[in-house]
Image: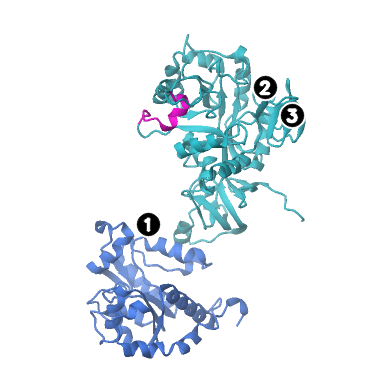
Chain colours: A blue, B cyan
Amino acid sequence: MRLVILDNYDLASEWAAKYICNRIIQFRPGKDRYFTLGLPTGLPRNHPESYHSYMWNNFFKHIDIDPNNAHILDGNATDLQAECESFEKKIKEAGGIDLFVGGIGPDGHIAFNEPGSSLVSRTRLKTLAMDTILANAKYFDGDLSKVPTMALTVGVGTVMDAREVMILITGAHKAFALYKAIEEGVNHMWTVSAFQQHPRTIFVCDEDATLELRVKTVKYFKGLMHVHNKLVDPLYSMKEGN
Amino acid sequence: MRGGQGAAWAPVLQFTNCRILRGGALLREDLWVRGGRVLDPEKLFFEERRVADEQRDCGGCILAPGFIDVQINGGFGVDFSQATEDVGSGVALVARRILSHGVTSFCPTLVTSPPEVYHKVLPQIPVKSGGPHGAGVLGVHLEGPFISREKRGAHPEAHLRSFEANAFQDVLATYGSLDNVRIVTLAPELGRSHEVIRALTALGICVSLGHSVADLGTAEEAVQSGASFITHLFNAMLPFHHRDPGIVGLLTSDQLPPGRRIFYGLIADGTHTNPAALRIAHRAHPQGLVLVTDAVPALGLGNGRHTLGQQEVEVDGLTAYVAGTKTLSGSIAPMDACVRYFLQATGCGVESALEAASLHPARLLGLEKHKGTLDFGADADFVVLDDCLRVRATYISGELVWQAEVAGQ
């Protein structure tokens, strides 16, 4: 894996954004060559904090993507099982995911693959762990009764199929999860640990997230920053036609 | 023609590179329009899976809901209170010219007149949607004749009336049909005003208090009977007194029916209301403030002397005088100038200044779902403003109806 450590949340976000940007451009996407970006999915639509609204406001409305190329798991579908299977099928039809970008929960989960999720799981309906519900409460004015308890999610196996995986981890409250994910063994109680067996994973984090790691680990990867920074500098642009 | 989100056949317009006034704030958002209404782009993206058919770059400007003027007596030489054979043309002329002031809807106002005038003029001013031809007519504002003799201002004394004898029947006899009427200004101290106020309110007509010597108690009772507006606060009413605040006291009255808000018109032309008075009113009750022009026919005529009916008027900048005197002869400040002056005098913030000319009059008339707002589903009547709040372009139903000339083309 690559472990990229930046000073704070803003710098980590910026580094990750530049990396994704460069990856897409170096892929040389075109009319018949799509770059498939994977992002974790969740809540039902038209909820005040719906994932659709979140994705629209934070991503889709700022770019010129064709709506037909945006596929989001529909938590309001009548047949959820069919919805999940169809999602897996769409990924396959798109030729697989080129880059999956995700975060990590305080309990070490990737997407909504809560502790105990199979490390070869596929897209399915999951009941959320209390930790996750508590973490999501801030989006519902702190009212626990309003937080959805179930969610459709891509599976660990689904993400493992991606050609590259990027995990973003910031904040001290995620530090223990990061430690479990990269310094301990592969364990379905800390599902992000599955990516130790992925050929191309990159973890981007801030200083606070490294608080539970061994000093040796942190020093090693910080020492590689000059190598890592070559991935974001120069920053390519679609306009330059490279 | 307007459609809803379901007007799927209509092209989708996306106004980009702008800040829109929504929810009381200037947001860095695009404005999406379809079928003459503001469109929810998120629904378009996820449900219809469509993108815009046309994008228009707004050059970093502010997009605000079109201004609504609920008190305007005429302009550009036209006097709405004059009974001609073709009142319609006069209204249409004003409707077209005020587009350049950012006004997309208005209430032509008639001052105190004899019944013959009302009977002849009112049927010629129907409610009408706006468009390239001009701003929309929301209905007529009848200011008088049921007002106070003492506070008549420039209204002709000979035509003042009371409704003591037959209350609402007197009103009907005077005005004729009330079909096209939206607002009536009256003095609540006149006998049987409560019956009249209740009858008018029951018809959906907004009752406004003005040209009156009413004390606060009388004014409060009028509001309890249904009155919801004050005509040009401070002007033509008793001044604020600390033991009897009069009509002005309604701004902070605790006797209003629960859940009801009193609105008040203010002429912010730099002349009719001292800026300190503007600030007192604004600070006391900011949500009720409605900017009005109360413009007279001399509006838009340019500096110099003009003959308007029986009057000789001298226009100098934003002020009109009776020719050869220093007596004010009505207001001639366009609505956008009022918004700018109001902003500068009160320091209230661009959002508040814009809402005072759009959202608040819409709320007064119960139109806030469709007018005075850029919420999804509202009519796409909006104005494009630069940072100094000068009008660059005006749109009605998503169609460009006026545009400032671009220098050096």
Q: Which mark is residue B82?
A: 2
Q: Position of residue A116 (x, y in %)?
A: 22, 77
Magenta-drawn stretch contains B249: yes
Left or right of residue A230, residue B120 in this image: right
Measured in 3D between alpha carbons, the distance from the residue under mark 1 to the one under mark 2, in whole angstroms, is 54 Å
Q: Position of residue A106 (x, y in %)?
A: 28, 73
Element assignment for label 2? loop
Q: Residues within 10 Å of mark 3 (few under 14, many from 20)?
A: many
Query: Marks 1 and 2: which is nearer the front?
Result: 2
> Please, is residue B323 above or below residue A37 in the view?
above
Query: In percent of the image, x 49 and y 38: which residue is there?
Result: B282
Query: Marks 3 and 2: which is nearer the front?
Result: 3
Element assignment for label 3? strand
**Residue assigned mark 3:** B314
> Please, is residue B111 above or below residue B51 in the view?
above
Q: Amino acid at mark 1?
A: Asn
Start and end of the magenta stretch? B244-257
3 or 2: tag closer to the N-terminus: 2
Query: In percent of the image, x 54 and y 78: which residue is there?
Result: A32
Q: Residues within 10 Å of mark 1 (few under 14, many from 20)?
A: few
